[in-house]
Amino acid sequence: MSKLPRPDMTMSGPVAAAIAVVLGAGVTAGLDLALLWWAALIIAVVVAFGFVAWTAPLISMKRGAGSGGAKEEGTALHKTLVMPTALILAVVSGLLSAWLLDLQLQEWAAALIGGAIGAALAFLLFHRLSTMLALSFAAVFAAGILAIGVTAAVLYFSGITPLDTFDRMLEYGTRPNSMVQIINDGITYYLAAVAVAIGFKMKLFNIGVDGQYRLAALLSAAVGGYLILPPVISQFVVIVTAVAVGGVWAGIAGYLKVARGVSEVISTIMLNSIATGITAYLLTEGRLAVEISTNNIGTPPIPESGWVPGIPATFLGSEREIFGLLFLAVAVGIGYWVMLNRTRFGFELRATGQSKTAAEASGVDVKKMVFLSMLFSGMVAGLVGLPQLLGSSHYYALDFPTGIGFIGIAIALLGRNHPVGIVFASLFWAFLNQAAGILPFDGIPQEIAVIAQATIVLTVVVVYEVVHRWGRRYQQQQIGKQLGRTTETTPEPAAVSHGPEHGSDEGDDSVPGRSKEDGTDDKSGGEAQ
């Protein structure tokens, strides 16, 4: 396609993007009359991507440079990896958008909008997707294939048809009510994973998220149940209580780390056990608990004025509601990104995580950073139980969800500690949990989802590291080649003429490397060379 003649002109980025979007929507609308909507959409996005690739040299915009400074566009890796990855992501995004819109719109309208979205992403990804990010997507894709293969092998040798099982999970997991449950579970998982990721960025392993959120949920539920406060104030007090309890409990481990050198792994494990004991002690009748039902006790229910209203999920075709604290999770994700990439604290946190010695040499108070990292991790962990508490159960009881902190560790690893990566990892994890719920009715062990989850986490970690290291070496090689070409093509600087007012160049001792009249080289010139 790049061999087709191009006009001798330039084109602005917005114009090219607009034409690509029109192509995506127009081709989808035209082909939808003769083909299935998904086939029409795929062809339309491919056509739009071809237009973007063809017009790329005509667009005057800064592109094709990687994070390491190496020019990426035109390289073999860019052609064989980045471009195909961008095309696949654009097609998948368009299909998913159309599928979601089809729940509310007519099929042709959903396909048309999906084609436009896919075409717009084709333009953005072609010009903005870096080699390292494309390698990350390739690693996740490869890990997913390996995980599916391992899970299929387990099913096959167990006498179960893999394709039928996967089809059954996909069908059940994409039902409207299932999607609402997946989003609600994903909100909780996301908060837990961000809490873990803050520690990971500092090379700290906060295993105590589970104890931190359970203790925070118990005490904040008790505060919300016993204190009758006006709306907004009630929610604010409950949230502040949860953040404070989680931060204090994690701060204990941080203090032990910096003051006594106690490993955070050991201290958080011990604090988990202590939190479990405290929770069991307080959650008894006569202390914080009251009888909820015949076989269940919990904190007094939070009055309706303290609830957080849910988001109607009619756009998904479900009568259920999405947790209103979805917006809190979004705020936490944005705050996490801003803290890491736009603040001095985030820079020092990442620098300390990379090398404590180098950070100390740069004037960073490492002990302070360790303590604050554990403190902030615990503060976010305190929020983990609130979506369930304020959006569904409205009290803390014996059946309150547990183990979410350990799930957060796996999701943080799967999402590579990135706020956007954690979103997809959380939803994927929640999808596997929800989709596996139908398997026992078909006589298939539900633990097959656990096998898939464990396999994909392991393979993502291993494959990503292998691909990432290879990508770094490749990038360094590209930079070295470019520096070599630059050195070869750069002409030597011409001799500078100082003019008559400075005297003649001939015999001027001030010019480095100039031979003197006696035939000896100027010493300073020799050193400069």
Image (cartoon, rainbow, N blue to C red):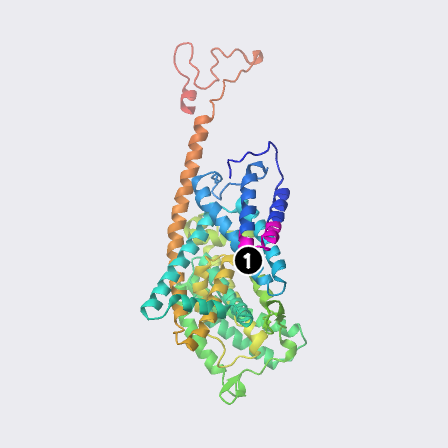
* Image side of residue 350 versus residue 235, left or right: left
Q: Is residue 36 magenta?
A: yes
Q: Is residue 490 magenta?
A: no
User: In the displayed structure, would residue 6 be above or below residue 41?
Assistant: above
Q: Position of residue 402 (x, y in %)?
A: 46, 74
Between 417 and 286, which is closer to the camera in this rendering? 417
User: In the displayed structure, would residue 222 be above or below residue 209?
Assistant: below
Q: Is residue 29 visible?
A: yes
- Residue numbers of the magenta segment: 24-42
Crowding near the residue tagged with mark 1, few <14, some 14–19, many ≥20 C-alpha atoms within 10 Å = few
Between 437 and 296, which is closer to the camera in this rendering? 437
Q: Name which quarter of the figure residue 502 lies in.
A: top right
- Where does the C terminus fall, quadrant-wise? top left
The residue most toward the left is 157
- Under mark 1, the amino acid is Leu
Q: Position of residue 152 (x, y in %)?
A: 37, 64
Prevailing secondary structure of the magenta residues? helix
Q: Residue at x 48, y 61 (%)?
A: 425
Residue carrying label 1: 36
